[in-house]
Amino acid sequence: MHLAINAYFWQRPFTGSGQYTRQLVYHLNRHVSDLEITLIYPQAAGDGAMEDVPPSVNIKTVPMRAGHIGKVLFEQRGFPQACADVGATIAHVPYWGAPLRSPVPLVVTVHDLTTVTVPDYRRGVKTKLYNALVTASAQGADHIITDSFASKLDIVEQFGVDEQGVTAVYLAAEERFKPAQGEDSLLEMATLRKYDLPEFYILYLGGYALHKNVMTLLHAYSYVAKSQGDDFPLVLAGKKPEPSPTVPDYDAYIEKLGLTNQIHWIGFVDEREKPLLYRSAELFVFPSRHEGFGLPPLEAMACGTPVITTDADSLPEVVGDAAYTINPDNFREMGGSMIALLTEPETADELRQRGLKQAAKFSWEKTATETLMVYMRVAGGE
């Protein structure tokens, strides 16, 4: 079997789609000896060569125009043509951007439907047109992979496809997400200094669009700040975007809540240093309203950090009984849960142990194996 993979996100390992593409390729290449893999890489003027590609994985470079139009042209023309050129027997687009027509059987991964189901993300003519295009392409794919059973139900309902044509394949935390090891102490100290982190802190790491629900987290933390804020500030990791119709004005809200001295923005975090941030945190809070999978809570649990998240979408599938799951609108309960874990060490320790066991249920080997089974069904049992 010769697999062609759309590598648009390969050089963006800090994105969810980039991490997914890389980990899937690494583990397929490592564990499946009779699978030939070719990455179809769109290269715009000025782009560098692909990095961190296993030596046994082929690369097919396709020139691409910069910008959104260039991306669409690559997805609809460049990628399918390259699949034919390399003689692929099956194609996989590991994000929601498949071609309407494919010369070979086509699998597409739809991680979630946030841009379709949340009204605030459906504004603008370009967005509506692109959503219509990728929806039509997914409906015409030979098979759809998604990250959870919650997302599978959404896809069946929204796309009107047969549930047999959609397979839920869980993701996993990478192996580097694990509890602290003795030899990591010096590196941990250097990382804490780099980000000017306090000795004890509550952590949020993720995006800041509306559906991430960080405003509710801030409201919830205001209850913590009254009694614990000086000892346990809230660290917000990840790039803070400018306010827009889909991004709240966080600075104004933090000032309104009187939390300026208790909130620590640390900005973009290097992927290699994320495990250290999780391990050093007293607890991790992930207040999202919509998630196709919810990888950060799993990464935190794998590092041995207690987790508070919500009962929205796929998150209960990911955390099981190993985290506090709260209604995403209930800021009082979210704040109370933070206080409980900070003041009840036995409860926090129990969640740590449960989290480690829950995280161990997921692995990229399983993800690769279950994805390979989809390829075999689509390709006719090769």
Image: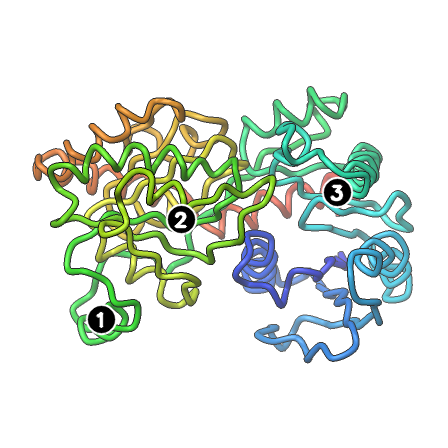
For the image, the number of numbered tags is: 3
Type of the residue with mark 3: Gly
Q: Position of residue 54 (x, y in %)?
A: 60, 73
Q: Nearer the viewer, mark 3 or mark 2?
A: 2
Q: Residue at x 60, y 40 (%)?
A: 245
Task: Give the residue pinned by disc 3.
Answer: 381
Q: Quadrant of residue 143?
A: top right
Q: Nearer the viewer, mark 1 or mark 3?
A: 1
Q: Secondary structure at mark 2?
A: helix
Measure how far apart labels 3 and 2 are at the Cα level: 55 Å
Can the viewer see residue 380? no
Residue found 68% across the figure and 80% down from its top? 48
Which of the two discs, 1 and 3, labels the residue nearer the N terminus? 1
Kind of residue at disc 1: Asp
- Circle 2 sits on which residue? 251
**Whether residue 198 is situated above or below residue 348 in the rendered picture:** below
Q: Front-most of 142 and 272?
A: 272
Q: Which residue is mark 1?
A: 184
- Of labels 1 and 2, earlier in sequence is 1
The Cα–Cα distance between marks 1 and 2, rounded to whole angstroms, is: 34 Å
**154 up-or-down from 74: above or below:** above
